[in-house]
Image (tube, rainbow, N blue to C red):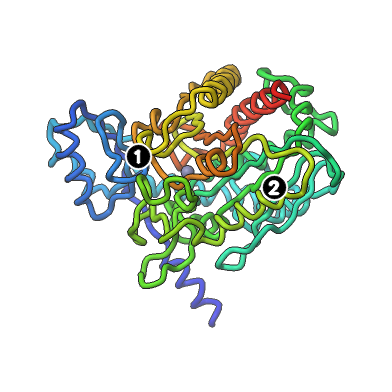
Amino acid sequence: MKFALLLTSVALSEKDYHGFKVIRASWESSEQTELVGSVLERLDTINLWQPESFENINYTRTVDFLVSEKEAFEFKRRVGNGANVVTLIEDAGDIIAHQATEQKRATRGLRGASYPYDQFLTYSQLEEWILANDDGELMSSEIIGETYEGRNIYGVHLGDQDPTSNKKKVFMECNIHAREWITPSTCRYFIHMLKSAKNGVDLTPTSFSMQELVNILDHNWYIIVSMNPDGYQYTFDSDRMWRKNREPNQGSQCVGTDLNRQFPVGHLTEGGSPNPCHFGYAGTAPFTSREANIWRDWFMQLRNAGGGDIEAQISVHSYSQLIMPPWASDRAAIPDEPEDTFYQMEVANRMKTAAFETHGKVYVAGQSRDVLGYPAGGMAEDYAYGDLGVKLSMLIELRDTGDFGFLLPATEIIPTAEELVAMLVQVSKSLSSTK
Ligand SMILES: [Zn+2]
């Protein structure tokens, strides 16, 4: 009886997006920004997809948002001719329901290493997959911390397992934002592709060779496949659109912190919110979340372990198809360092070409404050570069450019992963050339 009640309460608490639409709005002047911005802020059901906060709404970039059918109509009526309005998704609830059914069907009865690569996995499935793939030779995993809800966060090491190895290190984190399902899936496929190559099975697309892939093992790779397990699992159980972690905030009924606003460089200057109810809540200070501490502590542990230093840091996000080296923080506070920027942009442009040559998808490369058109403080990429001295720090936003956004179909996991790996091959090559 107790079990039945529990099931009912889970079912009832699930957020229903049936009838919700994803709308893209664009306009051409700053005067119109005021009108559109004020209408948007008054919508009760709005879930902003991009930009990442209301303050960053600007005529230079389109705004994508999820909203109820009624308020979608209301929005169009109120802005009138003040903006071009396109419906990207007619019914988000239909897609969410379809993906959930398909995910359950495709993974039912499977365990550990047998989960298909063209499917999204729940957190416990992902955890099982990591443990099943830990062979202690090419790949090892360790628990690097525990979340508020008691889930383990895993650090995966791909490469030379000899503790005295002096190879340079690459640090990579995926799925810091819960709803970006494509990120743990592509990071998982990267591990699979590399393990397969070591066993002589070529899964590489035509844009790079198996040998080029294997050559990335000139470096030791340290990967957090899911940086936000609680938030990620919450997107399966309760709200597909959740972004933050799930730790309660003192003095507030609202739960969760935006983990990619939790780092010290530019913390709470711009792009992060001081309001715990906001989906971009930055916390009262840097490192108030367990997850951001786990990120930093593992980084420090790897650095202090000796051997080669950590020379690249990659944060994997979605969506928009962007390759963004620092800085994300405001240029007025942190000006460019031309020599570093030149190097970072050179690598970013090679990554862009590699992604394009893989499946013809156009990624835009540039400092995030330029590409996005607004600064954002507290991000891992700026912390890695600014405070930890990792010259090659990047934030990659994977597919798509908005047709599905956070609801990208599972059929896109493998091609998107192939693009990501094509980019990582370039990261690795650029480190080799600076030896
Ligand atoms: Zn993100």
Q: Mark 1 — residue?
A: 51
Residue drawn at point x = 14 percent, y = 38 percent:
79
* Percent x, y of residue 232: 53, 54
User: Eyeballing the image, is 226 above or below 250?
Assistant: above
User: Eyeballing the image, is 202 above or below 107?
Assistant: above
Q: Mark 2 — residue?
A: 115
State which quadrant residue 182 falls in.
top right
What's the distance in space between the residues labelled 1 and 2, CA to CA? 34 Å
Q: Is residue 162 visible?
A: yes
* Percent x, y of residue 317: 51, 40
Q: Is residue 359 visible?
A: no
Q: Is mark 2 within 8 Å of ligand 1?
A: no
Mark earlier in primary sequence (1, 2)? 1
| Three-letter code for the amino acid on which mark 1 is drawn | Pro
State which quadrant residue 77 falls in.
top left
Nearer to us in this view, 207 or 256: 256
Q: How many marks?
A: 2
Residue drawn at point x = 71 percent, y = 58 percent:
143
User: Eyeballing the image, is 249 above or below 51?
Assistant: below
* Percent x, y of residue 127: 68, 55
In the image, taking residue 124 as reference, residue 349 lies left or right, namely: left
In the image, taking residue 322 as reference, residue 271 lies left or right, namely: left
In the image, taking residue 154 as reference, residue 68 lies left or right, namely: left
Kind of element beneath mark 1: loop
Kind of element beneath mark 2: loop
* Percent x, y of residue 228: 55, 54
Badge nearest the viewer, 1 or 2: 1
Nearer to us in this view, 89 or 101: 89
| Three-letter code for the amino acid on which mark 2 is drawn | Tyr
